[in-house]
Image (cartoon, rainbow, N blue to C red):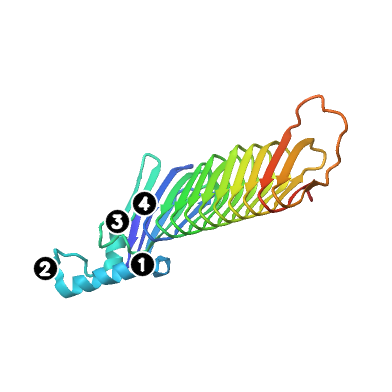
Amino acid sequence: MTEDVEDVVRRQSFETDGPIEVDLGTGPGRIDVRLVDEPGVHVEVRHDPSGASPFSQGVSSLMSWLGNQFGNQLGDVIPPSVPAEAVRQTRIDLTGGRLVVRTPKEVQLRNVPVAVSVQAPMGSHVAAKSGSGDVVVTGSAGRLELHTGSGRISADQAAGVAKIDTGSGVVRLGPMAAGVRAKTGSGDVEITALGGVSTVVTGSGDVWLGAVTSDVLARTGSGNVTIADASAGQLELHTGSGAIRVGIREGSPAEVDLSSGSGEARSDLDLVTSPPASAPPLRVRGRTGSGSALATTAVD
């Protein structure tokens, strides 16, 4: 293990072989995880003023002023250098194949924006939680569990189940082989491919899903729902006022049921006049309150 501490930047490295468990937690700070085809784990923790919300910046400035004005009369409310102290007190530990990084929770330090960057072997399982910063995972992960209060979330790829939650940010994911449970209060959700049972919910954003081969429930309060290339699974699609568009892979038998309260619902697919010998591998049910609903052939 090696460690390098600067004024407001801290770096630490560990020797390890193969995937690990990555468990990260910050206050108002950004989290970046890079999963690469290399051994070893590298961690960088730094003060990141750009990651602070206006409220957090105000609280931090107030506490610094109080500390400078009153010093020990407030029981050492604030250290001489708040950002540097927040970086120094951040926990970085790798034990039993599990990396834990936690920024301090003390009142005078928890609102300091601290960014965490980690490089770990690909295939590692990642759990990351930020109070208000972005969470970004690049490379191929095992399981994913990502949360932020108001930032965006993006991840390249996961072989295991992914759990994604943001209060208001955008969610952008690559192929999720084992499915995903994704929720955002108001942001858009974009997922390249879904290979497992999935639930996607947004309060008012759009939902865009690429290749779908398993059961999916997609719901938005007012956004559009688009499935680019569906070939198997049971799809339940709901929007209060947005449009629904489903692309069916050519040659994939499908049962389609679309309706709109006040808009147009139609299908451009070829119809069969006799019932199939067995249940089709793809079933689509879409409901929109006032938007249009369309089933059509997927575009290569």
The Cα atoms of the two marked residues, 1 and 4, are separated by: 24 Å
Going by the numbered disc 4, the residue's amino acid type is Val
Q: Assign a secondary structure to mark 4.
A: strand
Going by the numbered disc 2, the residue's amino acid type is Gln
Please give the residue where the numbered disc 1 appears in the rendered image. 55
Which circle marks residue 101 in the picture? 4
124 vs 3, nearest the viewer: 124
Going by the numbered disc 3, the residue's amino acid type is Pro
Q: Dot 4: within a 10 Å radius of its alpha carbon, few (fewer than 14), some, or many (20 or more) residues?
A: many
Q: Is residue 168 visible?
A: yes
The Cα atoms of the two marked residues, 1 and 2, are separated by: 25 Å
**Front of the two marks 4 and 3:** 3
The Cα atoms of the two marked residues, 4 and 3, are separated by: 10 Å
Which is more N-terminal, label 4 or label 1? 1
Q: Assign a secondary structure to mark 2.
A: helix
Total numbered circles: 4
Is mark 1 in CB contact (under 8 Å) with mark 2? no
Q: Assign a secondary structure to mark 1.
A: helix
The Cα atoms of the two marked residues, 4 and 2, are separated by: 32 Å
Q: Dot 1: within a 10 Å radius of its alpha carbon, few (fewer than 14), some, or many (20 or more) residues?
A: few
Residue 213: image x %, image y %? 68, 39
**Residue drawn where x is 60% and y is 37% of the image:** 197
Please give the residue where the numbered disc 2 appears in the rendered image. 73
Residue 68: image x %, image y %? 19, 74
Q: Is residue 15 visible?
A: no
**Residue drawn where x is 42% and y is 54% of the image:** 42
**Front of the two marks 3 and 1:** 1
Image-quadrant location for residue 60: bottom left
